[in-house]
Amino acid sequence: MHAIVETGGKQFRVAPGDVVRVPKLAGDPGSEVALGKVLAVFQDSGELLVGNNVGEARVNATIAGHDRADKILVFKFKRKKQYKRTQGHRQDYTEVRIRDIVA
C-alpha cells in the first residue's frame, strides 16, 4: 500500500517504512506526526481509493531528525557591466519515517 501526500507545498509518494525528506516540520526527533493532506491511496493490487475514503485516510510518521540540505550557489551577473553577485542557500528539512497508512 502506498499514498500520495502533500506537505509543505510539495507532493510525495510514501509507503510504510520509507524515510522521506520533507520541508521543515515542527516537533522533536522521535515524536509522532500525521503528514498533511492525503491526495490518493493505492492498494497493493494497484486499486485507487477515491472519494470519501481518501478524506478519512491518514499517514502516520515519526520524525527521524532535522537537518539542512547541501549549499547551492546562486550567481547573478550582467555581461559587459561588471555586475556579479554570489549568494548561498541551504534549505531546512525534516526526515520522517512512515509508520503506517490508515485508509
Image (cartoon, grey):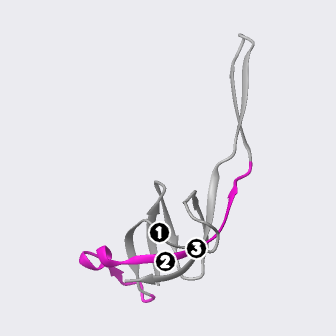
Q: Position of residue 5 (x, y in %)?
A: 44, 67
The stretch of residues the image draws in magenta is: 44-70
Q: In this view, does 25 lie above or below 14?
A: above
Look at 70% across and 16% down and name the residue there: 79
Mark nearest the camera among 1 and 3 is 3
Relative to residue 19, is residue 7 depicted above or below?
A: above
Residue that numbered label 1 is attached to: 35
Mark toward the start of the polypeptide (3 vs 2): 3
Q: Which of marks 2 and 1 is nearer the N terminus?
A: 1
Task: Name the residue beneath numbered marker 2.
Answer: 60
Residue at mark 1 to residue at mark 3: CA–CA distance: 12 Å
Residue 25 spot, x, y in % from top left: 55, 60
Q: Which quarter of the figure has residue 86?
A: top right
**Which residue sits at x=73%, y=20%?**
84
Given the current orientation, which residue lies at the most extreme bottom position?
Answer: 45
Count residues near mark 3 (Cα–Cα under 10 Å), then give few for <14, some for 14-19, many for 20+: few
Q: What element carries label 3?
A: loop
Residue drawn 40% across the image and 77% down it: 58
Instruction: Provide residue 28's location: percent of width, then percent of height.
Output: 62, 66
Amino acid on which disc 1 is placed: Leu
Q: Mark 1: which secondary structure?
A: loop
Q: Which residue is drawn at 41% across and 80% down?
A: 42
Q: What's the amino acid at mark 3?
A: Ser
Residue 85's quadrant in the figure?
A: top right
34 in the magenta segment:
no
Residue located beneath label 3 in the image? 31
Q: Are marks 2 and 1 in contact (CB under 8 Å)?
A: yes
Q: Badge 2: few (under 14), some or many (20 or more) residues near its Cα, within 10 Å? A: some
